[in-house]
Image (cartoon, grey):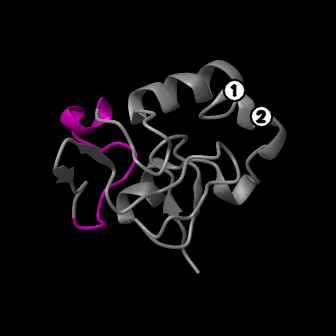
Amino acid sequence: MEKFACLCCGCLTLDERGGYDICPVCFWEDDAFTAFGNDDFYVLGTGDETYETVNDEFLDLPSGANHGLTLRRGRENYRKFGACVEDMIPHVRKPKKSELPDNEKRRKK
């Protein structure tokens, strides 16, 4: 079964897009509504997003499922210390070889 790339770390760990799966590599929760503000919900898209195709406008919107963390901050945190939030470091693991980001595989999703 092919996996979807996590929008935070880029690893191929998710069974579906927007299904609230938590990435075991970075602990980002892949929510259907990536962000919300006031009375508006911002839907990330149709499920065809990959790590590379997320529009810049969505990178700075707070994620409801990730307690207001933005995707941009989650990505920065992952690069800095290996989890979307420092408190989640005990819950993450290194990616398996089959989960490592591969541009060709990610573009298929």
Q: Which residues are magenta?
A: 46-60
Q: Residue at the top extreme?
A: 80
Q: Residues within 10 Å of mark 2 (few under 14, many from 20)?
A: some
Q: Is residue 93 visible?
A: no
The part of the image, by quadrant, that contains residue 1 is bottom right
Q: Is residue 82 visible?
A: yes
In magenta stretch: residue 47: yes
Seen in the picture, residue 82 relative to 64 is either above or below; the reply is above
Seen in the picture, residue 86 relative to 26 is either above or below; the reply is above
Amino acid type of the residue that numbered disc 2 sits on in the rendered structure: Ile
Q: Residues within 10 Å of mark 1 (few under 14, many from 20)?
A: some
Q: Is residue 17 left or right of residue 59?
A: right
Seen in the picture, residue 93 relative to 74 is either above or below; the reply is below
Instruction: Look at 36% across and 57% down and name the residue there.
Output: 107
Q: Are marks 2 and 1 in contact (CB under 8 Å)?
A: yes
Q: Which residue is mark 1?
A: 86
Camera-side residue of 53 and 105: 53
Q: Which residue is mark 2?
A: 89
